[in-house]
Amino acid sequence: MMHPSIGWPLAKNKIRRGMINHTFGMVRRNRNGTKRPHQGWDFESPAGYRCYAVADGRVHTVRDVGAYGKQVILEFRFDLDNDGNEDVLYAMYAHLSRIDVVAGQNVAKGQQVGLTGNTGNARSMHGPDQHLHFELRDKPLPGRGLAHRYSPLHIFGVCPLRKAERKAAG
């Protein structure tokens, strides 16, 4: 069950094509068959759909660079390791077509932060491959690989692989 301080990033949240290789971890394959990491979850979404803050927080970074294209990085607090102390975490939204917030801005859970798109390495994607790439981090700009990244399952409590999870109204 999802913690009440956390919300979904889209109105309808389902992993792209219902495939495990669009989730977090060593779930992708190189041409030679070896495994490679995917740093977050890809939520199915045509370009132009609203993206929402998953928690109350502060916009840490807004940028348009590299494979992620237009991005928003939201800083928020959540007890990730269940030790009774809130951890500083970062939610990263990538491939956006429009950004509706600025760095330093405080946002409330459920507030619109931008619109889905296909910027960065998602530029050539069409139909069911269009998506919001979403990451959970403990560092705002961790570099490549899985270091300082966590499965979004830690905050959402469920992975919407086969069935869409809907954002609560409000």
Image: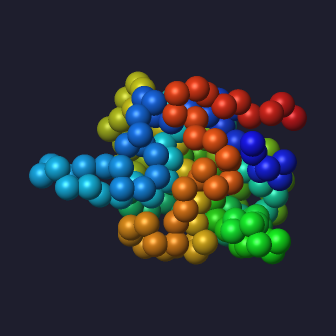
The front one of 26 and 41 is 26
Q: Quadrant of residue 106?
A: bottom right
**Can residue 137 be seen here?**
yes
Q: Is residue 14 above or below residue 84?
A: above
Residue in the picture at 46% in, 52% down:
24
The front one of 1 and 126 is 1
Question: Where residue 19 appears, x then y in whole percent?
Answer: 41, 34
Q: Quadrant of residue 127?
A: top left
Residue in the picture at 83% in, 52% down:
5
The front one of 35 and 137 is 35
Location of the C terminus (image quadrant): top right
Question: Where residue 151 appears, x then y in whole percent?
Answer: 54, 56
Residue reaching furthest to the right? 170
Question: Where residue 76 appears, x then y in whole percent?
Answer: 74, 65
Question: Where residue 123 appears, x then y in whole percent?
Answer: 37, 42
Q: Is residue 83 above or below residue 49?
A: below
Q: Is residue 163 above or below residue 138?
A: above
**Can residue 48 be seen here?**
no
